[in-house]
Amino acid sequence: MNVAVQTMDAIREGRNSFSKKDIHLKTGIPWGTVCRAVDDLTAKGFIFARKEEPAGRGRPMIPLCIDSEAACFMGIDVGASRAKLLVCDLSLKSLGQDCVSTPRYRDGKLFFDWLSKLFDDAVEKFKIDKRKLRGLGLSVSGNVDAEKGVIVSGGNFGMKWGANLPVEKLAERCGVDVCALTSISAAAYGEYQFGLKAGCDDLLTVNLGVGIGSGVVSGGRLLISRPDRRIGYIGHILMPDNPRVCVCGFKGCLESYSGGSALAAIASEKRLGVSSASDLDALAKAGDAAAKEMLLKAASYNAVGIASMIQIYSPAEIVFSGGQCRKDGFLYSHTLKTLKELLPEERRRSFSVSLSSLGEYQSALGALRLAYEKFL
Ligand SMILES: [Zn+2]
């Protein structure tokens, strides 16, 4: 993380009462570097020194404040069924949030038409001064080449592999810098920055929704998934006894059975009388044998994927999110139970588990934070 970001974070965490010395002590950044960063951020108008009457003798401590209105940022998460948007000011305080349905993908032009309209509508709705909007972080449920800024696919909303949409085109239309990454990576960063377990340097996120995936912060670094170097792609781990074909085109992927839409489809094929994964969960909880059988299988698949992540990355915290993670849910509780049974004894107590406090805005927040960091 660069010095400007660390300095801004320290001032924000110090609730606008930190002096340069406090920043130096808190961050461990050398004194001269802190002074240069503060001068630079002041010159840009992002922070200012609060004037206070000197108290007592000695050199006065000058508290530094963020000028919240100097800039703002937007985060958009294009999920499998819903898109979440939020806007924050320079203090990362929310200025508004919104949630709309994700349309089925038809072509790149229509996709960017839809996204730029979403952007324009939010600018109007939340009365954003567009000149102050300094970055858009876009997270997409699918494959994204974050380094090249290319959206490669989004199977769960119909964008097939090889769509290869350069986000530069969206940047031109919106008149703002755009950075993009996968929803899974953005979710991990959202939790690392804003969640209940924020600051935990070895953090794993697991999303059990329409798609299934896992994000990783390891040693304090976000591991960003790329199409040719995937991280946490557990939804597409091969389950040898699963004959179902996945949205990615392969047969036997974990999420082609355990994903929310897949469960609803299988329940319908089996004529269980439910049309959604949440209704199926309620049916299993009520004791229906066929529903229980289905969800126990889904739980065992989930557990295999999550156990693999635990074995590879040794997280201290695992944060769950997604439509299928209900505290008292059948699938969620059995996923956790099976996970503990699968893991070797010494691993079972090496991490703790919680549900996300950020709700469905987790990935939009992570993407927004990256746009903020890129700008600074
Ligand atoms: Zn797949």
Image (tube, grey):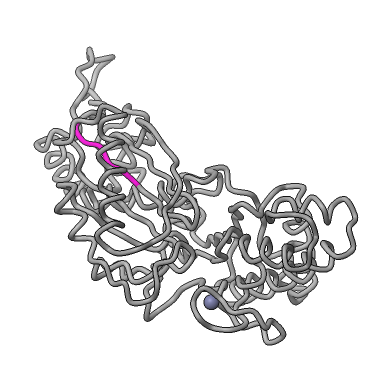
The answer to whether residue 64 of the structure is visible from this angle is no
Q: Quadrant of residue 334?
A: bottom right
Based on the picture, tell me whether residue 266 belongs to the magenta stretch: no
Q: Nearer the viewer, residue 86 or 57?
A: 86
User: Is 143 left or right of 295, judged from the image as shown?
Assistant: left
The residue located at (53%, 83%) in the rendering is: 250
The answer to whether residue 345 of the structure is visible from this angle is yes
Q: In which quadrant is the N terminus drawn?
A: bottom left
The residue located at (65%, 51%) in the rendering is: 354
User: Is 79 left or right of 294, judged from the image as shown?
Assistant: left
Q: Nearer the viewer, residue 8 or 165?
A: 165
Instruction: Residue 376: give x, y in percent of width and height.
Output: 21, 48
Instruction: Residue 205: give x, y in percent of width and height.
Output: 55, 59
Q: Nearer the viewer, residue 76 or 373?
A: 76
The residue located at (52%, 43%) in the rendering is: 358
Q: Quadrant of residue 86?
A: top left
Count of residue discs = 0
Q: Which secondary structure dominates the residues rendered in magenta?
A: strand
Q: Is residue 21 above or below residue 211?
A: above
User: Is 246 left or right of 333, judged from the image as shown?
Assistant: left
Instruction: Residue 60: give x, y in percent of width and height.
Output: 22, 23
Q: Is residue 52 above or below residue 236?
A: above
Direction bottom: furthest residue: 240
Q: Which residues are magenta?
A: 70-75
